[in-house]
Image (spheres, rainbow, N blue to C red):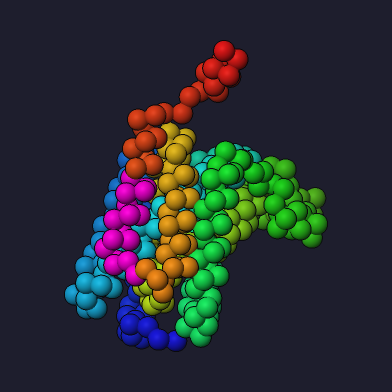
Amino acid sequence: METVGSPGLWLGFFAFVGFMLALDLGVFHKNAHEITLKESAIWSTVWVSLAAVFCSGVYLLLGSNYALEFATGFLIEKALAVDNIFVFVVIFAAFGIPLVHQHRVLFWGILGALVMRGACVLVGGAFLQRFHWAIYVFGGVLALTGIKLILQRNAVSDPSKNIAIRLFRRVIPVSQTLDGGRFFTKLRGRWVATPLFMALLAVEVTDLIFAVDSIPAVFAITKDPFIVFTSNIFAILGLRSLYFLLAGVIDRFHLLKLGLAAVLIFVGAKMMLVEVIKLPIAVSLGVIAALLGGSIVASLVWPKLPKSDTVASKAA
């Protein structure tokens, strides 16, 4: 599979990711604790700064076009990662996971996400390079996903009813209570899964579903697996700190899903019309930033009405 990423670049990137994860879990978050707003803000800044440094390195080594592709891919993935936060809030509430253990679930969830994203990038990249017509299929799927997101923007799913969760419960018994930070524990002489593991499983399933949408979206910007993979991973690595930073205020950005939907529709249309309209990467970056930024600003200018006010206005 053709890529600008040399073996040295791939190995260097994997070494960097491994080092940062070991530093995160082994040093800064060795002991379970509630992540403070200050701590999450610092780590969010660190991850975005590292992504900016990496983008600068791409510019110096590979040129401005690849640097723009990375920046655009990172922005798309970061925005779609915010949509994950809506789901994570529901998952932790459904399984009763306290703040002190949420970081552990997200850490191991992201390790699984790294493997799944890597597999999706390899398969998707090889498929697109072999079958050009697949880009139209990917584009159609993204556009339909965007439309579905608009139609179902207020829907709240119950993670406990997910098919993967239900199948797992049929095979492995699940306890009703937590046992500290353990994923499995012994109950009446036999091993059972704890709600912490069920939350982890729900997080993994959620990321797999989002990967099906997000990775084709980046392939609309660049066909190079190295740029697709690295932009994906940088966005995912900062997801935990972003979750703890935004989880308490995510409801304020109630129009963000509309912005995300518009991005998916735009990117899907771009893929389907690739032979007709060839937008420069800088233009695509500007459009995506405008759609996301506009939805955030609109959410703050026109805040969501409390349920009581909504009911009252309907009654009037």
Of residues 231 and 297, the one drawn nearer to the viewer in this rendering: 297
- The image quadrant of residue 311 is top right
Is 281 inside the magenta-drawn segment? yes
- Residue 160 locus on image (x, y percent): 69, 47
Is 209 inside the magenta-drawn segment? no
- Residue 243 locus on image (x, y percent): 44, 46
Regarding residue 47, the answer to whether it shows in the image is no
Residue 164 left/right relative to 294: right
Q: Check the image and report above or below for 234 versus 301.
A: below
Q: Which residues are magenta?
A: 278-293
**Residue found at x 61% / y 58%:** 205
- Residue 211 locus on image (x, y percent): 52, 63
Of residues 276 and 37, the one drawn nearer to the viewer in this rendering: 276
Q: Check the image and report above or below for 52 versus 61.
A: above
Residue 284 left/right relative to 113: left
Regarding residue 224, the answer to whether it shows in the image is yes
Image quarter hosting the C terminus: top right
**Residue found at x 70% / y 52%:** 162
Report the magenta stretch's main SS.
helix
Q: Check the image and report above or below for 19 versus 89.
A: below
Residue 10 left/right relative to 140: left
- Residue 90 locus on image (x, y percent): 58, 42
**Residue found at x 42% / y 64%:** 270
Name the residue furthest left: 60
Name the residue furthest top: 316
**Residue found at x 36% / y 32%:** 300
- The image quadrant of residue 219 is bottom left
